[in-house]
Amino acid sequence: MMAKASLPIEGGCQCGALRYEIAAPPLMIYACHCTNCQKQTGSAFVLSATVPEAAFSFTAGKPAKTEWVSDAGNKRYGHYCRDCGSRIANGQDPSIGILSLRAGTFDDTSWVRPAGHIWVKSAQSWIKFADDDLLSNEQPTDYAPYVARFKSFDLFAN
C-alpha cells in the first residue's frame, strides 16, 4: 500500500532558500517526456503535479523566472531558485489557472505516482511503459482520463 499525503503539501528547492506550499491536492501527476522537460531536468522525463494556481504560494524566498515556447507551441514560464537553480513550478502565459509543480520538490515524495505519460513520441528508447499506463504521443487534448486515474489512486489522507 502506498503512503498517503496530507494537506498542506510543502516543498522547496535543493538548497532550501525557496519554499512553497499547496493548499489543495494536485489534480493529477504525470510524467512528461518532451524535449523541453528532458533539457530542463537533464533526465529522461519529469514528474509534474498540476495544481490550481490559487492553491500555490511561495512561503520563503523569491523565485527567479525564465520563459520559453513549449513543444506544443505555448508560451511558458518557470519559477526556479536563484541560488541553486532548482526548478519549482511552470505556468502558461496567458494563465490557464493551473501550475505544473516539479513533484520531486515535495518534501515527502513517498506518495507520488504518475497517472500517465505524455509526449511519449520523445521518450528515450529504453523507457518501458506498463500495459495499463495512460499514454499520449503529444500534449493531450483531454486530461480527464489522467485526472480520473490519479483520483482513483486515493492518495490523500484528508
Image: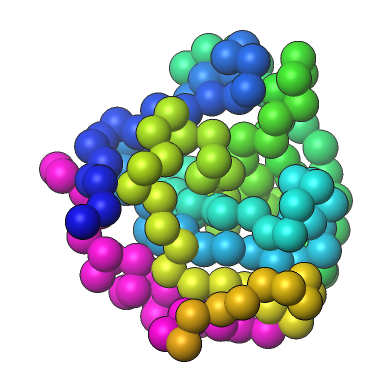
* Residue extending farthest left: 158
Does the magenta portion include 150?
yes
Residue 64 location, quadrant: top right
Does the magenta portion include 155?
yes
Scheme of image coloration: rainbow
Q: Residue at x 52, y 63 (%)?
A: 30
Callout count: 0
Q: Residue at x 84, y 52 (%)?
A: 39
Q: Position of residue 144 (x, y in %)?
A: 40, 78
Q: In front here: 148 or 56?
A: 148
From the viewer's perspective, is 128 left or right of 151?
right
Residue 13 location, quadrant: top right
In this picture, which residue range is highlighted in magenta? 132-158
Q: Residue at x 49, y 72 (%)?
A: 116
Whether residue 94 appears in this view of the structure is no
Residue 132 location, quadrant: bottom left
Q: Position of residue 47 (x, y in %)?
A: 57, 54
Q: Quadrant of the N terminus?
A: bottom left
From the viewer's perspective, is 118 left or right of 19?
right
Q: Residue at x 64, y 54 (%)?
A: 46
Q: Position of residue 29 (x, y in %)?
A: 46, 59
* Residue extending farthest bottom: 131
From the viewer's perspective, is 123 left or right of 114?
right
Q: Position of residue 43 (x, y in %)?
A: 75, 52
Q: Is residue 19 above or below residue 120?
A: above
Whether residue 15 appears in this view of the structure is yes
Q: Quadrant of the C terminus?
A: top left
